[in-house]
């Protein structure tokens, strides 16, 4: 019986080639999207799961508010981990990770290479995380100073072999420390929230250890099995009272946490499950680029909707051409076939169709995975499909989709009454089916929502590009790592500044883009700091030229100047800081901050207020910030006039090589770094655009087929109308009108949904566009235009047919 | 009104060329009621299509009101057709999705009559056909005889000079058939020219003249009046 089903299904497929083609192409494209997106989603959900103890690993997060400035940190103080382990038996182990500036210069052969996948960690890292070793002993690997654990790739890169134990790697720090390789580990997986090639011993970090008030270490704890981490969070209050308050009393005259809280301040610690970090953590500083669960939801919804559009095509086309199959059903029924068997037959047909679609879809996935990886920022491989779990999932797709898509047509077709259909009364029921109208509305609803989303995302991206950010990011060349030039840094800057095409220069260790250096300090408005007058604020060390070179605007007061000998204690604050302080005229007022290892309170005088500039992503409001004179030579900024940038870069590189032959020359343009902050949004834009186009394409395939059958259904009516004198235009309008109506209804439903969805998305941005009415108009118009173009080809064809032909079969 | 001379029409399939009309000639004067008879496949419907300006002849001459229309393009034919000719079909060919009123209104829409005028004229003709009480019903809700009366109403609403009826009683029982024939006769008496294709000798008796066809040619002409 089943064999007969397959044979009949196959012959039917061949018999209606256009129909089958439309269906299979639609299904294949829909399934390809679905597979790509599920691969993406599964990858997102798989982060950090390779850790054997993943479920028991937690990161300590800190939430601090001091003087009205909120800090949501992914780091805590250096003694926190050890303290928890000492005082609470639930804590089995802890590990700290420290990567202060994110890169190191390592010597390979005679030259230094900048490596960014570097960090310092406690030797306990191997007790907490699963980092399989190729060689070496995890118990002792990082227990001594001057030791480093490297990945297989790093071993091959530096030594040409994984057999690297005992070999040395020189780091370009002040002492030119040579680290001994004590272990080689397998490369860390891409789907982890951190990924390092070099893990250095924590003993080499120079730090004022034991300070509970400085938050600089990513700290993870491994809890005993069965420990409730939410209940554990209550213990932090004890820790604060016992360890942190005494230090705070000494430094800032804070007497009790109650007083601290009463003045609107906050100090809270909490554990965050490591498995949540990738999708739920948006703190500072993160060890890698995290994603957001929001995008997982959006992508999943898009995958499902595209698959549904493809299924809807199938349902629509199958029921639309039911009149062609009605006779077959009639005959089969007269011959004694039951309804169940007919349903079985139709479901076999749909499943077969989906199966063929799936094979093509896998081919499409194979072809498009590179492009998809590119726009989604992933490194997914087609081999992912071969994992047993996924393979089973793939095989389930045709069955589930086949039934989903085939069920309605199966019931619809199998319920025909044999006598009625054999007499030719197939009824008008399916030419104007409400159900099918609903399906078309659904398809266009989805397409229009996707179009609107795409427009809004691109509008926001455009807004970001052109936003008034308070500084000039264009034609700003940043040469990285100028600190490595040591005493030559000034000479280098001066030499480059003399080159033609360079207008101005400034040391610029602190840059107004994410992932640049930051320095958060505690200030007070009075000479004795307490919980009432204390607050936190960024303080950047800049030189005399920084503010003019960056194009920042001084609103009140003056820039730092060599004419004033007292400017070493001058401070320039931004508008937010000025507002927070509440002074009528901040210029001339004094602020106090703790300086140096002795935590000495030093006074600064405010000399100017600068216009707010966005130094973090536009998702965030501008926080309080101050600048003082200093020389942070980590990087140097050059304002260039771009006539021949390539030649200029070459000159600068030559200059660099002459001063530091063994150091890599590395540069960036500030506007590129600025754009990098919005890479996630750019990705979402491209992904939304791609899938919007595909959704529309699939919907149009369906509409194309549907219009063909509708025109066929109404052949006689068109004939009659033509006999009565209808023109081609009026017939075309008549046939397109129904679809236009459906698209209009779809628009009306899609508008509020899209508005809601995009308003929610935009809420993440402190600075955002408004969703103007023309976006909806445009989306509706595009959908309508596409629908009309798709339908009208059939309509015109039908209208041009000689009515004699359509009326002949009487 | 109609003068046909040596009219020719061929149908070509991939291999065979069938002659539908073979140098057919005849004439219909204004005010006449002519029945065309003959066995299936003799070319009756082809003739009616050409006379109805739905189809173009392959040869010969066709004068409509003294104008040569053989060789007219589709647009010119459609223009001439909608102002001058009404059609009545065997299977009524009413549009199921439209009401009685809307069906009858259709030809007026296509000739560009204003809505207010349309209402008057449709109601007038529905009244004349005695189906005014069914104006808001759909075709499926009517009997065969009523449907054909609607079809006749639709054919005459534009006051055409010529009505072409293709087996108008073929789908009706005898009493409904007679009613429809009486309607056509009344129209003819009011001056409308009628050409009717029929298999029924009984219906043919309502006409003034019977043209008998065989293999695309006229064989005999009986004058009945």
Image: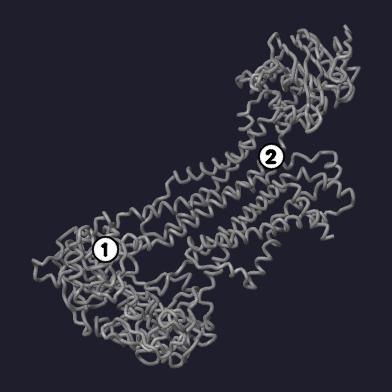
Residue topped by disc 2 = A710
Residue A620 lies in what quarter of the image?
bottom left
Mark 1 lies on residue: A576
Marks 2 and 1 belong to one chain: yes
Q: In what quadrant of the picture does the N terminus of chain B appear?
A: top right
Foreground: A285 or B213? Answer: B213
Q: Give the x, y percent position of residue B90.
A: 81, 25
Is A567 displayed left or right of A336 in the figure? left
Instruction: State which quarter of the image contains the C terminus of chain B.
Output: top right
In percent of width and height, residue A201 lies at 37, 87
In the rendered image, residue A155, in percent from the top left (x then y), is placed at 43, 82
The reply to whether the C-beta atoms of the residues labelled 2 and 1 are less than 8 Å apart is no
Query: Mark 1, residues whose alpha carbon is within 10 Å: few (<14), some, or many (≥20)?
Result: many
Work out whether mark 2 precedes mark 1 in sequence or the reverse, and give the earlier one. 1
Q: Is A717 located above or below residue A234 in the figure?
A: above
Number of marks present in the image shown: 2
- Name the residue rendered at 42%, 72% in the picture: A288
Tag 1 secondary structure: helix
Left-right relation of A418 to A768: right
The percent coordinates of residue B179 (x first, y second) are 84, 19
Crowding at mark 2 (Cα within 10 Å: few <14, some 14-19, many 20+) = many
The answer to which of A756 and A197 lies nearer the viewer is A197
What residue sits 48% from the left and 42% below the top? A777
Q: Marks 2/1: CA distance?
A: 64 Å
Task: Tell me which corner region of the image, top left, top right, bottom left or bottom right, holds residue A573.
Answer: bottom left
Q: Nearer the viewer, mark 2 or mark 1?
A: 2
Mark 2 element type: helix
Q: Quadrant of residue A730?
A: top right
Output the chain of dot 1.
A
Query: From where the camera sits, is residue A583 visible?
Result: no
Image vertical order of residue A106 relative to residue A580, above or below: below
- Up the image or down, A797 lies above or below A568; here it is above
């Amino acid at each position: 019986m089943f064999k007969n089903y397959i044979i009949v299904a196959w012959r039917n497929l061949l018999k209606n080639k256009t129909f089958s083609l439309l269906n299979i192409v639609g299904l294949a494209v829909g399934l390809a999207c679905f597979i790509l997106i599920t691969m993406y989603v599964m990858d997102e959900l798989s982060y950090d799961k390779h850790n054997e103890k993943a479920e028991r690993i937690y990161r300590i997060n800190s939430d601090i508010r001091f003087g009205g400035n909120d800090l949501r940190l992914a780091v805590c103080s250096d003694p926190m981990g050890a303290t928890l382990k000492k005082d609470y038996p639930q804590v089995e182990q802890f590990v700290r990770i420290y990567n202060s500036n994110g890169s190191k210069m390592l010597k390979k052969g005679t030259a230094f290479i900048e490596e960014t996948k570097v960090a310092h960690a406690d030797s306990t890292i191997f007790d907490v995380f699963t980092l399989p070793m190729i060689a070496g002993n995890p118990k002792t690997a990082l227990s001594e100073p001057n030791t480093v654990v490297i990945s297989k790739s790093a071993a091959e890169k530096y030594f040409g072999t994984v057999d690297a134990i005992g070999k040395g790697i020189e780091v370009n720090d002040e002492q030119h420390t040579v680290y001994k390789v004590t272990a080689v580990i397998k490369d860390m997986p891409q789907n982890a929230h951190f990924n390092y090639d070099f893990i250095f011993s924590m003993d080499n970090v120079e730090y004022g250890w034991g300070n509970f008030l400085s938050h600089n270490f990513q700290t993870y704890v491994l809890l005993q099995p069965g420990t409730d981490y939410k209940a554990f969070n209550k213990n932090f209050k004890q820790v604060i009272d016992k360890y942190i308050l005494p230090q705070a009393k000494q430094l800032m005259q804070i007497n009790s946490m109650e007083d601290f809280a009463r003045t609107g301040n906050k100090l809270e610690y909490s554990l965050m499950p490591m498995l949540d970090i990738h999708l739920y953590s948006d703190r500072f500083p993160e060890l890698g680029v995290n994603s957001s669960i929001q995008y997982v939801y959006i992508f999943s919804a898009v995958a499902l909707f595209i698959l549904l559009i493809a299924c809807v095509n199938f349902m629509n086309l199958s029921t639309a051409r039911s009149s062609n199959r009605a006779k077959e059903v009639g005959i089969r029924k007269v011959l004694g076939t039951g309804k169940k068997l007919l349903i079985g037959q139709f479901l076999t047909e749909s499943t077969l169709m989906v199966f063929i679609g799936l094979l093509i879809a896998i081919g499409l996935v194979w072809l498009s995975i590179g492009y998809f990886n590119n726009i989604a920022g992933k490194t997914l491989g087609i081999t992912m499909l071969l994992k047993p779990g996924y393979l089973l999932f793939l095989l389930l797709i045709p069955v589930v989709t086949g039934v989903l898509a085939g069920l309605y047509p199966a019931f619809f077709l199998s319920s025909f009454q044999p006598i009625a259909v054999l007499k030719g009364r197939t009824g008008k029921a399916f030419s104007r089916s409400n159900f099918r109208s609903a399906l078309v509305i659904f398809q266009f609803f989805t397409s229009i929502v996707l179009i609107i989303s795409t427009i809004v995302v691109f509008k926001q991206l455009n807004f970001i590009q052109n936003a008034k950010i308070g500084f000039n990011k264009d034609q700003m060349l940043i040469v990285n790592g100028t600190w490595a030039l040591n005493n030559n840094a000034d000479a280098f800057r001066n030499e480059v500044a003399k080159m033609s095409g360079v207008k101005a220069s400034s040391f610029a260790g602190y840059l107004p883009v994410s992932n640049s250096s930051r320095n958060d300090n505690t200030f007070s408005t009075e000479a004795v700091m307490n919980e009432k007058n204390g607050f936190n604020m960024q303080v950047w060390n800049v030189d005399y030229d920084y503010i003019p070179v960056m194009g920042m605007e001084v609103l009140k007061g003056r820039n730092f100047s060599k004419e004033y000998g007292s400017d070493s204690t001058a401070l320039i604050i931004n508008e937010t800081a000025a507002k927070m302080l509440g002074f009528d005229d901040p210029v001339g007022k004094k602020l106090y901050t703790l300086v140096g290892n002795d935590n000495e309170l030093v006074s600064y005088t405010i000399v100017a207020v600068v216009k707010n500039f966005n130094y973090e992503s536009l998702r965030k409001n501008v926080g309080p910030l101050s600048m003082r004179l200093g020389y942070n030579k980590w990087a140097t900024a050059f304002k260039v006039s771009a006539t021949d940038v390539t030649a200029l870069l070459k000159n600068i590189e030559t200059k660099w090589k002459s001063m530091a032959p063994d150091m890599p020359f590395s540069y960036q343009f500030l506007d590129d770094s600025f754009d990098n902050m919005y890479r996630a949004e750019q990705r979402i834009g491209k992904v939304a655009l791609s899938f919007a186009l595909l959704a529309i394409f699939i919907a149009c395939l369906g509409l194309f087929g549907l219009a063909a059958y509708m025109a066929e259904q109404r052949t006689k009516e068109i004939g009659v109308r033509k006999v009565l004198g209808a023109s081609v235009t009026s017939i075309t309008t008549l046939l397109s009108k129904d679809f236009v109506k459906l698209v209009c209804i779809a628009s009306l439903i899609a508008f509020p949904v899209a508005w809601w969805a995009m308003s929610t998305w935009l809420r993440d941005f402190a600075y955002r566009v408004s969703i103007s009415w023309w976006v909806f108009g445009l989306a509706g118009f595009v959908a309508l235009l596409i629908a009309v173009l798709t339908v009208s080809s059939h309509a015109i064809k039908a209208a041009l047919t000689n009515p004699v032909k359509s009326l002949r079969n009487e | 009104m109609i003068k046909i001379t040596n009219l020719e029409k061929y149908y070509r399939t991939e291999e065979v060329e069938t002659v539908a009309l073979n140098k057919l000639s005849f004439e219909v004067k204004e005010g006449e009621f002519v029945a065309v008879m003959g066995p299936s496949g003799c070319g009756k419907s082809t003739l009616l299509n050409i006379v109805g300006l739905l189809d173009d002849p392959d040869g010969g001459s066709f004068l409509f009101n003294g104008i040569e229309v053989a060789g007219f393009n589709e647009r010119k034919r459609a223009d001439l057709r909608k102002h001058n000719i009404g059609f009545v079909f065997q299977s009524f060919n009413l549009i199921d999705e439209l009401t009685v009123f809307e069906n009858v209104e259709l030809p007026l829409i296509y000739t560009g009559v204003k809505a207010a005028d349309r209402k008057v004229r449709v109601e007038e003709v529905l009244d004349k056909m005695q189906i005014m009480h069914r104006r808001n019903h759909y075709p499926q809700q009517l009997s065969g005889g009523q449907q054909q009366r609607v079809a006749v109403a639709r054919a005459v609403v534009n006051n055409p000079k010529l009505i072409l009826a293709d087996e108008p009683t073929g789908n009706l029982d005898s009493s409904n058939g007679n009613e429809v024939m009486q309607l056509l006769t009344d129209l003819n008496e009011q001056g409308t020219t009628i050409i009717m294709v029929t298999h029924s000798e009984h219906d043919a008796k309502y006409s003034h003249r019977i043209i008998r066809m065989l293999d695309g040619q006229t064989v005999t002409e009986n004058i009945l009046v």
